[in-house]
Image (tube, rainbow, N blue to C red):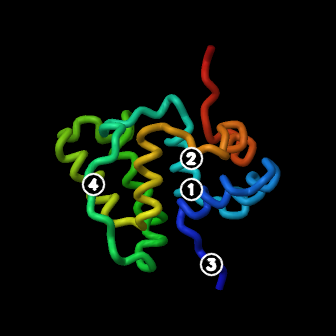
Amino acid sequence: MAIRYSISEIINKAIELPTKKEKIEWLQQHQSEPLKTVLKYWYDESVEFLVPNTPPPWKKNEYENEAKSLLYRESRRLKIFIKGGGYDNLNKIKREQLFISLLEDVDNGDAEMLCQMISKKSPKGLTLKTVTDAFPNLIEAKEG
């Protein structure tokens, strides 16, 4: 059985690879809808988060192995936290509670990565160009 990396492990490994070509190949090898969703929300400037862009307080979980692949299942919940995701009228406090709950459910590395994602701070070593080369049409071109 192939190893299933967490979303954050895939992204962190891509960051560490020395060449753009290797980064693209790695991302493509491990492509999934949850990975693409995270990258789109992180890099697409048209995606606007409806939660504060600073990490909320949350309890790290102790179920590392069980939580490793949880973001694959839970990634569909991410639309709750973006403008136009269908949950724009959700109570602000309820939305923030749901975000904290998601952070507490998923792998700790994935939780840290989701906090970086909402801050829109792209990781050093993984550029927008690399992401769009790996997954063309993932991110809408900025009009300008």
Circle 3 SS class:
loop
Q: Nearer the viewer, residue 61 or 76?
A: 61
* Residue depicted at 56% across the width and 56% down the height: 35
Give whichever of discs 3 and 2 has the lower sequence position: 3
Q: Are marks 2 and 1 in contact (CB under 8 Å)?
A: yes
Residue with the mark numbered 3: 3
Residue with the mark numbered 4: 100
Left or right: 23 as drawn, with respect to 62: right
* Residue depicted at 78% across the width and 53% down the height: 18
Circle 4 SS class:
helix
Residue with the mark numbered 2: 39
Q: Are marks 1 and 4 in contact (CB under 8 Å)?
A: no
The amino acid marked with disc number 4 is Ile
Circle 2 residues within 10 Å: few <14, some 14–19, many ≥20:
many
Left or right: 27 as drawn, with respect to 102: right
Hey, which quadrant is residue 14 in on the image?
A: bottom right
Question: Is label 1 or label 4 in front?
Answer: 4
Q: Are marks 3 and 2 in contact (CB under 8 Å)?
A: no
Residue 100 picture location, percent across and down: 27, 54
* Residue depicted at 65% across the width and 61% down the height: 13
Give whichever of discs 3 and 1 has the lower sequence position: 3
- Residue 4, disc: none
Give whichever of discs 1 and 4 has the lower sequence position: 1
Residue 99 picture location, percent across and down: 30, 51
- Residue 35, disc: 1
Circle 4 residues within 10 Å: few <14, some 14–19, many ≥20:
some
Question: Is label 2 or label 4 in front?
Answer: 4
In the displayed structure, 9 sits above or below 76; it is below
The amino acid marked with disc number 2 is Leu
Separation of disc 3 and disc 4 at Cα?
A: 28 Å
